[in-house]
Amino acid sequence: MTTTTHGSFVIERAYSASPQRLFAAWADPTSKRAWFVGGDGWDIQSYELDFREGGRETSKFLFLKGEEMFGEKTVFGNQTVFNEIVPDERIIFTYSMDRNGVRFSVSLATVEIKADSKGSRLILTENAAFFEGADGIQMREQGWQELLGKLSSFLNETGATQ
Amino acid sequence: MTARNTTHATFVIERDLAHPPAKVFAAYADPKKKAKWFGGPPEWKSQHTMDFRVGGKEVSQGGPPDGVVHKMSGEYWDIVENERIVLSYELHLDATRISVSLGTTEIKSHGAGSKLIYTEQGVYLDGYDDGGQREEGTRELLGQLESYLKT
């Protein structure tokens, strides 16, 4: 028996970087990997980014607390397809999340980048469908809040050299 | 810089159908059956191809004679037999992408028939379309599905 729920959220965040630098952090595989994957508690098994319309991003990462939280070795998988890319302005993508090969969510995400006097503003809108055993919309929003914070740190750390 | 804008909208359409879930699911899963109800009016001469598996693609393309070509390009993201189908799709008018959507079709056993719940979450681009129009078009499509199921 399947259960499906739907949810959405919007996150707005200001960055001191220009729209061009902000966009490049999504477009360049090395930059994207630096803020998008990794971190404490995760062991990255694979990451690939083909940033073009119709291109894919795939990653697999071992959750180190899997035994503790799920009672088994736990590998999460992420697959993304880029639907639309407008340089420095807009990225629309569809992505799924799997846990040990079982799909638990599919999302449609829109990232909009707008110039402002202090740099740029990023607006992320996510619409998602969650299946059996999914994290749910609140944890997903929290996850993106953390990622967009890591993006901010990445831009600050690399600002002097770019 | 071109003025770009987006609007996001979600709609849900429910239908009680007099047919069991397996028959409703087959109308989505079997390309020959889906082609009978999914698509524009007959004069659009829509071309339809689909590969019904997770990661498989679906394309439906057509339009009024000498008019704008409407192209739907989709991809299947989740399929649970007789229960759930998740399809993302883009809609183009000629070369312009006007929307990207995530559509979830749920089929539940309901009395002697089934309940169909279709939820579409979409982003509409640069003012070409909106959620209200899309919902109206989708209601027409589901009406065509109902007529097809009666045959």
Image (cartoon, grey):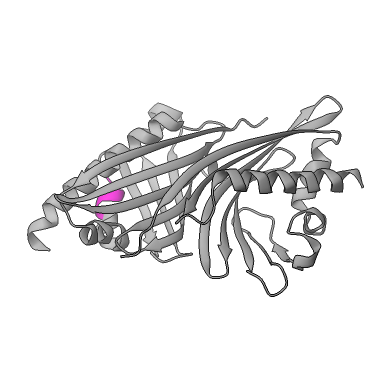
Q: Say whether residue A11 is magenta.
A: no
Q: Where B56 falls versus B120 (above or below)?
A: below
In terms of secondary structure, what is the magenta stretch mainly? Answer: helix
Taking depth in this image into account, of A12 and B74 the one nearest to the observer is A12
Residue depicted at x 51% and y 66%:
B96
Taking depth in this image into account, of B141 and A100 the one nearest to the observer is B141
Residue depicted at x 44% and y 54%:
A93
Please give the range of residues in magenta. Answer: A34-38
- Quarter of the image for the C terminus of chain A: give it: bottom left
Q: Residue furthest top?
A: B111
Residue depicted at x 32% and y 45%:
A123
Q: Where B28 falls versus B4 (above or below)?
A: above
Give x and y (percent) for residue A155. Answer: 17, 52
Does residue A19 appear to the left or right of B94 in the view shown?
A: left
Does residue B30 appear to the left or right of A159 in the view shown?
A: right
Give x and y (percent) for residue A103. Answer: 54, 42
Does residue A70 appear to the left or right of A156 in the view shown?
A: right
Q: Is residue A105 visible?
A: no
Give x and y (percent) for residue A109. Answer: 43, 47
